[in-house]
Every structure is written in structure tokens, then in C-alpha cells.
Image (tube, rainbow, N blue to C red):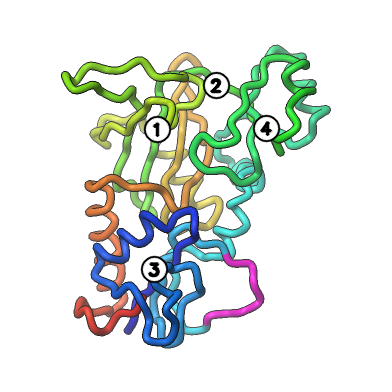
Amino acid sequence: MKLYVWYSNSTSVTGRELANSIGLSRTSPNDRNRGYGTLPPPKYTTHCVVWGAKYNGERYFPGINFLNDAKLVHRYSNKCLALEQMQVKGVTIPRFTDVKGYAETMLDEGLELIGRRYSHQGGSSFKFIEDSYDLNNDTTSDFWLEYKETEREYRVHVFNGEIVKIQRKKPKLDEEGDEIEPDSHLCKSHDNGWRFSICDISRVHEDIKRQALKAVEAIGYDFGAVDILRLPDEDKSYVLEVNSGMGLDNAGLELYTELVNDWYSSQGGENEFWNRCM
């Protein structure tokens, strides 16, 4: 049995780290470029972890047991399509549209919007749309999402139908351990001065966990990191997106290494280095 970690250029840093942590060789005997993980799984692969890799080709992979389907990852890398699918399956999400006229209607109703690209990473392409002027001058966004103001933003890690980790976005700390005022409260990205703080799963609101599980199931993933907001005044939790190739800190890398190893072992895989390919 042979295990392969298939990742994209944009997720290659964590993809390589995960492959190395699991104990996979960086290259395949058949193709030097397989060390970068951007090619489909090579011959004799029996199990494949799809870490953000997108594949929309006609080739099929009989006999391979996938952890996340690369064609689903390709389809739902379009965040608007992912929101549509989650909406159909009853996941609570903010209002959204990729029709500018309807976005104008949402503004007329007093809503504020966030402009996004269909495919984006982190806080890239983020545009705050407050009024018609902003909307008319927004020439880069593909769709618009209702802005929900809250300091309670979480990332919920789901793996094979179970919640394995929950993090909350908080301001970065200085050398004395005091919080640094972020550059932006609209987009809570790492570049804007935010970090992930670990949460006690048992103390996180049940609706956050419920919506995260529904979101991953709705788009057919085996695992994913769900970005979700909690609005206490509305008593609701809103899913923003599901990440299939998320960045990991050292603790996260250790966790996913254990999860993948356990999954592989449950399929009959062995732990010896020699019987895996990368």
C-alpha cells in the first residue's frame, strides 16, 4: 500500500510539511516533479490525501482511496459555488450574490457588503462595500457577501465527521504578551494582525459546531477547516467558507499527521517508510 499527499502550488508549504511529518519521501522514482505534489497521484498509489489540490481532468483513479475528492476541491474552490451548495443543504450563511444589481438591493436595505473573488486565499481580494459608490467602483470582485460585524470569529477543524480542533481569531501579542491593536477589524487575517488561539471544544457554542459539521458534509469533503462567525445578539452562527488546504502551526501539523496516520492505518496501511510514495 502506498500513500500520496497531493497539494497545489498555493498550499505547497503546508502540503510539503505534512508529507514530511507523515514520513513520505519527497520524490517518486518515476518523476522528479512529484516532490512538489502538484501532479496527480502516481502509479501504485492506494491512498491519497488531497490537500487543496484541484483537479478537473478526465482521468480517473480506480483503486485509490481519497481523503477529500480533488474534483470537489476544484469545484468548491469557487467560494460562491460552495456557498450556494451550503445554502441548499441548510447551512446558515450570510446573504450573498454574484449579481451586481442584487448587491445594490442589499445596500438599499441597509446592509454592508464584502466583495470577494470566486477563488481567494486568506484576506486577498477583500473589499469593504459601504454604499453604491463603493459598489460601482468595485471592478475586481466576483461576488458580494453580507458583512456581519462581530469579534467572535472561529476556525473549526472537521475530520471524518468529527470536530478535532477549534480556534478563535484574536489580536497578535507583543513580547510582553499584551494584545497589539490589529490593522483591521473587517478582515481578520494574519497579515492584518490576527492570530489563532486554541479553544476548549466543550465550551464552544453548540451551534458553531453544528454548522461547521453541516458545512463540511454539504460540500462532500472528508475534512476541512470551517471559518465561522458567532453573533450572540442574533443567536446565530454564520459559515463563511470551508478550507481544504489550510495553513497549520506546529500543533496543527502534529494533529493532522496523527489524523492521517490513523486514517491510513484504519485502511490497512503500514507505517514503514519504504511502502509509501510521494
Q: Which residue is mark 1?
A: 190
Task: Please state which amino acid type lies under the numbered disc 4.
Answer: Phe
Q: Label 3: how many residues lie within 10 Å, few (<14), some (14-19) or many (20+)?
A: many
Q: CA distance from mark 1 to mark 3?
A: 26 Å
Q: Which residue is mark 4?
A: 96
x, y percentage for residue 61? 53, 80
Quick one: label 3 or label 4, which is nearer the N terminus? 3
Quick one: label 3 or label 2, which is nearer the N terminus? 3
Considering the numbered disc 3 on the image, is that residue within a helix, a strand or a loop? strand
- Is 239 in front, or is 234? 239
Q: Which residue is mark 3?
A: 5
Q: Are dots 3 and 2 in contact, CB under 8 Å? A: no
Q: Nearer the viewer, mark 1 or mark 2?
A: 1
Q: Magenta includes 164?
A: no
Quick one: label 1 or label 3, which is nearer the N terminus? 3
Q: Nearer the viewer, mark 4 or mark 1?
A: 1
Q: Which residue is mark 2?
A: 148
The magenta region covers 55-61
Query: Can you say whether 100 is above or below 18 in the image?
Result: above
